[in-house]
Amino acid sequence: MTTASPAERTTTQFLWMDLTRKCQLNCTHCYNASGPEGDHGTMTREDWLMLLEQAAEAGIEHVTFIGGEPTMHPHAIEIADRALALKMSVEVYSNLVHVTDKWWALLQREGMSLATSYYSNEASKHNEVTRRPSHPRTRANIIKAIELGVPIRAGIVGDDEQIIAAAKADLEAIGVKQIGVDRIREFGRARGGQEPDTTNLCGGCGEGRASIGPTGTVSPCVFSTWMGVGNVHADSLSSILDGPTLAEALEILRADWGKKDKDDDQNKPCGPDCVPKNPCDPRCEPYDACRPGTPTTCQPRV
């Protein structure tokens, strides 16, 4: 991995660190088809730590660990600890099926937060999505996070308004204050064999943020991983984020978003001026709801 110069700084403020394709669950709509048979890719412990150093030098302030299930990565705690030492805020997007004591200790530190997905207040409907009996553990660990004072947000993904409303009411009842809702986006397992379609993206890809996957490939976001714009095994993070390949990808995405029906509220794209100036701006929906990672500076909306 090429080392970045301290002088190299980008306009990017937020990174998804997509650590692994391994997960205990096998969700029907998983955007990158992670599951029990997944692996940790080619990024080593040293690669992730070096990447964090480059990100800090580039001025990046927020990271979200995601996957797969990021807590299953053997070096995730050490990587998160390094990010905190570099004065970054760290969010862990976890299914909350299994959280060890070491993880709970880390999550209670200043600068840490949690995010999770919740599909239904009814165990059978939630488990139908995850294809594992995961609901009781996820719900119990959401409650534990709240009791421990760990900042947590939840995302509800689905197409049934009644199920969504009931899930949201349940989350609110147990104390979750930051809740996002999004439709199923046709990537990964939800794609059904079809080619990826940029119009399924939310409209904020690459604008002040990027994703690095377990093979070192950089993409505009976690949903657009097929649009690789470079690899940190070969080039510095700053050179990729400020490079022509990412700029060209963003031009393609902007052109495709411009073809969307401006009167369709569900698909109306978030304008580039929303990101990263104010990633919590409610005018940026559905961007803030659909993305798996939200910088921890965001506050619950009223």
Image (tube, rainbow, N blue to C red):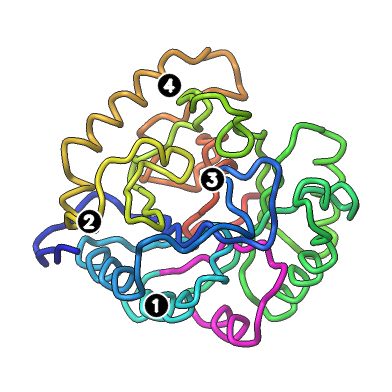
Q: Position of residue 155 (x, y in %)?
A: 67, 50
Q: Residues within 10 Å of mark 4 (few under 14, many from 20)?
A: many
Q: Nearer the viewer, mark 3 or mark 4?
A: 3
Sequence order check, earlier mark of 4 and 2: 2
**Secondary structure category for the residue under label 4:** helix
Distance of label 4 from label 2 (alpha carbons): 26 Å
> Rounded to the nearest whole Å, what is the CA distance between mark 3 and mark 4?
22 Å
- Left or right, 233 with respect to 34, comes to left
Residue to which mark 2 is pinned = 237
Q: What secondary structure is marked by label 3?
A: loop
Highlighted magenta segment, given as a residue range: 89-110
In which quadrant of the rendered view does residue 213 lie?
Answer: bottom left
- What label does residue 84 carry, if any? 1
Residue 258's spot in the image, x, y percent?
41, 17
Q: Secondary structure at mark 2?
A: helix
Task: Report the disc number at residue 257.
Answer: 4
Q: Earlier in the sequence, mark 3 or mark 4?
A: 3
Could you tell me how far apart the alpha carbons at marks 2 and 3 are, in whole angstroms? 22 Å
> Mark 1 and mark 3: span between their CA atoms?
27 Å
Q: Nearer the viewer, residue 283 or 203?
A: 203
